[in-house]
Image (cartoon, rainbow, N blue to C red):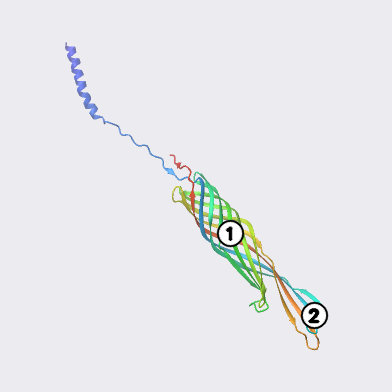
Amino acid sequence: MRASLISLTTLALTVAASPVRAADLPARMPVKAPIMAPVAYNWTGFYIGANAGYSWGRDPVDLATTSSVRNQVFRAFGLPAQTQISDTTTAGAAIGASSTANLDGGVAGGQIGYNWQLSTWVVGLETDLQWTGQRGGAQFCLTAGCPAGSFTTTADYKLQWFGTARGRVGFLVDPRVLLYATGGLAYGEVKADYTSGIVGLPLAAASASTTRVGWVVGAGIEGALTNNWTVKAEYLYMDLGTFAGVGSSATATVVSPNVPGQGFTTVTDTTINQTSSSRVRDNIFRLGVNYRFAADPIVARY
């Protein structure tokens, strides 16, 4: 009987103490939310865009000049009744001259390309085609002050259009800001118009155009505005090589009248021939916008 009372007392005390211990414990342990990994901008993928800017060239022009003088002496009693007595031609010394054509003007066009992102590096390929309003010229005169009787030449140049095919290598200074260098092939059409002749006499005109192939290098910065749109600023140096222009020629004729009592007439023809060449080099600054066909975002890992 005594043992039973002790057991019942122990059971009662245990039941009474249990709610107190349960009340001392928190109803539910808090759970910390998982940290979401940030999403980084992904430069990989195709893009297409447009650009506009200004270009300035400093293109040296070399002019090579040769001349000849032909003297014809006639015994004449009134032209055209005449008898030729002599006909001699004397070659003059070759003369070289140089100047610089400032080939300046606006540019506008479009580009298309593809990027691969490799961690903080971006490599890619880009090609573009540009309209240009660049034009400039140089003037030459064989005699100082260019008096009447001097031979003069004006060479006008125009870069009709150009394009490039380049590689790009860049470094991400920020996930959305790319600094890059670029270089590759350049090509374009150059047109030249020449006007030459003797001052005081009608001038002769000639023109030529050619498509040249050269090289281009440059650098730029590009930043992402949204997941699809980027803007860029870019500088390019382009060299299309040497462009040989057409030759030009002009002849001045001077007729010395009959000398009284002698009956002679002298006809002097002075002919000047010129050829020119220019090396087309260009500095290009342009701003552009690209629409990027976005790849899947890159999730940063910790």
**Observer-nearest residue: 121 or 100?**
100
- Other residues around mark 2 within 10 Å, as few (<14) / some (14–19) / many (≥20): some
> Going 55% across and 55% down the picture, which residue do you hit?
218
**Image quadrant of residue 92?**
bottom right
Q: Residue furthest bottom?
A: 261
Image position of 48 (left or right of 138): left
Q: Provide the secondary structure element on which disc 2 rests.
A: strand
Image position of 203 (left or right of 264): left
Image position of 272 (left or right of 299): right
Q: In the image, is residue 182 above or below residue 252? A: above
| Residue underneath mark 2 | 73
**Image quadrant of residue 243?**
bottom right
Q: In the image, is residue 23 above or below residue 260? A: above
> Going 63% across and 58% down the picture, which residue do you hit?
211
Q: Amino acid at mark 1?
A: Trp
| Residue underneath mark 1 | 161
Quadrant where the image shows the C terminus: top left
Query: Which sits earlier in the primary sequence, circle 1 or circle 2?
Result: 2
Q: Provide the secondary structure element on which disc 1 rests.
A: strand
Image position of 301 (left or right of 247): left
Q: Amino acid at mark 2?
A: Val
Q: Residue furthest top?
A: 1
> Going 80% across and 80% down the picture, which residue do you hit?
73
Q: Position of residue 118 (x, y in %)?
A: 51, 44
Quadrant where the image shows the N terminus: top left
Q: What number is the disc on residue 264?
A: none
> Going 21% across and 27% down the picture, which residue do you hit?
20
Q: Position of residue 10 (x, y in %)?
A: 20, 18
Q: Position of residue 23 (x, y in %)?
A: 23, 29
Q: CA distance from mark 1 to mark 2?
A: 53 Å
Q: Residue furthest front?
A: 80
